Amino acid sequence: MDFRVSALLSLQRSLWDLVTPNLRGVAATIEHPKILVRFLFENRPTVEDRENVSEAETYTIADFTEGMDIVFTPDWVSMSQPRELAEGEQWIYLRKEE
C-alpha cells in the first residue's frame, strides 16, 4: 500500500474516540518518512486535550516501522481566526462550523 494511503488510514484510526468539542480540525503533512500533524483547538488546549493528542500520536507511531518522523502538536486557533492550512498540509478532520 502506498505511504500516503497508509498514513491517512492510520490518522483516521488514531482519532477514534479522541475528537472533543474543543477540536476544530486536524491537518497533516505527509511526506515519507514524515507525518506531521497539527490539532487545531478553539480554546487553549487543556491537559486532557494534550493527552488526547499524545494518545493519537502513539497510535500512529505504532502503525509504522522505526525511522519515521511522526510528530503531533496541539495548536490554539480561536473562533475569531479562520482555520487555515500551512504549506504542504491537508485536512484530516474538520468539524462543521457556522
Image: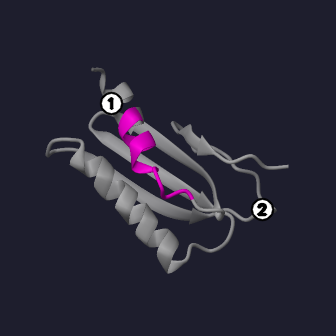
User: Which residues, given as a range, are shown in magenta?
Assistant: 9-19
- Judging from the image, what secondary structure is the residue with disc 1 in? helix
Q: Earlier in the sequence, mark 2 or mark 1?
A: 1
Q: Which mark is residue 43?
A: none
Q: Residues within 10 Å of mark 2 (few under 14, many from 20)?
A: few
| Mark 2–mark 1 distance (CA, rounded to whole Å) | 32 Å
Amino acid type, label 1: Ser
Q: Are marks 2 and 1 in contact (CB under 8 Å)?
A: no
Residue 13 in the magenta stretch? The answer is yes
Q: Nearer the viewer, mark 2 or mark 1?
A: 1
**Mark 2 element type:** loop
Q: Residues within 10 Å of mark 1 (few under 14, many from 20)?
A: few
Callout 2, which amino acid? Met
* Left or right: 81, with 41 as reference point: right
Tag shown at residue 6: 1
* Residue 86 lies in quadrant: top right
Image quadrant containing the N terminus: top left
Q: Is residue 58 above or below residue 30?
A: below
Q: Residue at x 30, y 27 (%)?
A: 3
Depth check: 12 or 41 in front? 12
What residue is pinned by disc 2?
A: 79
Q: State the residue in front, 71 or 14.
A: 14
* Rendered view: 5 above or below 85: above
Q: Is residue 11 above or below residue 23?
A: above
Q: Name the spot of residue 27 as percent of width and height, x first.
A: 54, 45
On the picture, is 8 further left or further right than 97? Answer: left
Residue found 58% across the figure and 43% down from its top: 93
Q: Residue furthest top?
A: 1
Residue 24 in the image, given as x and y percentages of width and height: 66, 55
Query: Outermost residue toward the bottom?
Result: 47
Left or right: 9 in relation to 65: right
Q: What residue sits 57% from the left and 72% below the top?
A: 45
